[in-house]
Amino acid sequence: MDVVNQLQRQFIDYSASLHREGFLDDQFTQLQKLQDDNSPDFVVEVASLFFEDCEKLINNMARALEQQQGVDFKQVDASVHQLKGSSSSIGAMRVKDVCIAFRSFCEAQNREG
Amino acid sequence: RKRQLLTEIVLRNRLTALVVDADTTCRVLEQLLLRSYGVQTQGVDNGRDAVTLIASGVKFNLIIIDMILPILNGLEATRQIRDMGVHCKMLGVTACSGESERQAFLAAGVDVFIEKPLDPEHLVPILRELDG
């Protein structure tokens, strides 16, 4: 039971620090509350879905940005836009904020940015 | 205050909703959020399937629809659904945040424009209204 308590404390501390450092926002807290006996693995499952989606989108962006002939910023922007939507839905605040900044680079056609 | 909102109402499966979003994370989250209030939900990932489903006669109290969708986009899907004479509450829930996007979505026929994420603060009053 001691180990369980210890792990629980670690988890709470880690969650708190992620919130403090701006990685997660209130939306994530709301999602954690949706987890109950009917859906005990809800947070893990949704986070996994999010990471899968992230990987696809980031690969799309990388491919578009690597184009030697000229970057299709519209394509990059579309992926960033989708990432902004899903990261805000899951409460990944810092990812969402990066997306917002990223989009202004796309508008300015700034590849270095 | 926010903690209260999540458990403020339970609708006991009286309401039904359709979630139209191409992004799996968003669609799953929005459906789960609705279900936590006792709303029965269906989800589709493109505009054409949404229109087809509604055209087949399935009734929903609420439609949550994103703006950017494959095959048929959210604006056009919304227009087509309204043109069918469907008057249910439609929420445009999108990552788009500009005033012109907002106007365009409202003009297409959504009742409310909500910038993602869809959260209880926006949803609960709407569910209350639908529940009567």
Image: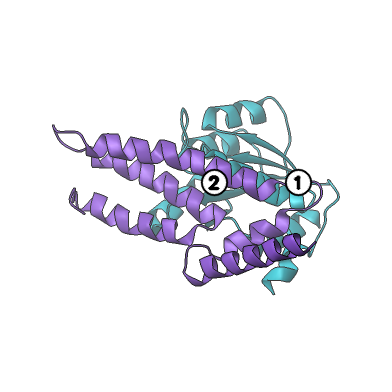
Chain colours: A purple, B cyan
| Position of B41 relative to B52 (above/below) | below
Which residue reaches farthest front?
A2
Kind of element beneath mark 2: loop
Mark nearest the camera among 2 and 1 is 1
- Residue A80 is tagged as none
The residue tagged 2 is: B109
The residue tagged 1 is: A39
Indicate the position of residue A8 as horizontal and vertical percent values: 70, 63
Residue at the (52%, 38%) spot, across then down: B79
Q: Residues within 10 Å of mark 2 (few under 14, many from 20)?
A: many
Residue at the (36%, 58%) spot, across then down: A98
Label 2 in the same subunit as label 1: no
Q: Nearer the viewer, residue A22 or B112?
A: A22
Numbered disc 2: what chain?
A: B
Determine the image quadrant of residue A65. top left
Check disc 2 and give the amino acid type: Gly
Q: Which quadrant is home to the C terminus of chain A?
A: bottom left
Q: Residues within 10 Å of mark 1 (few under 14, many from 20)?
A: few
Q: CA distance from mark 2 to mark 1?
A: 35 Å
Numbered disc 1: what chain?
A: A
| Position of B120 relative to A52 (above/below) | below
Q: Is residue A2 left or right of residue B29?
A: right
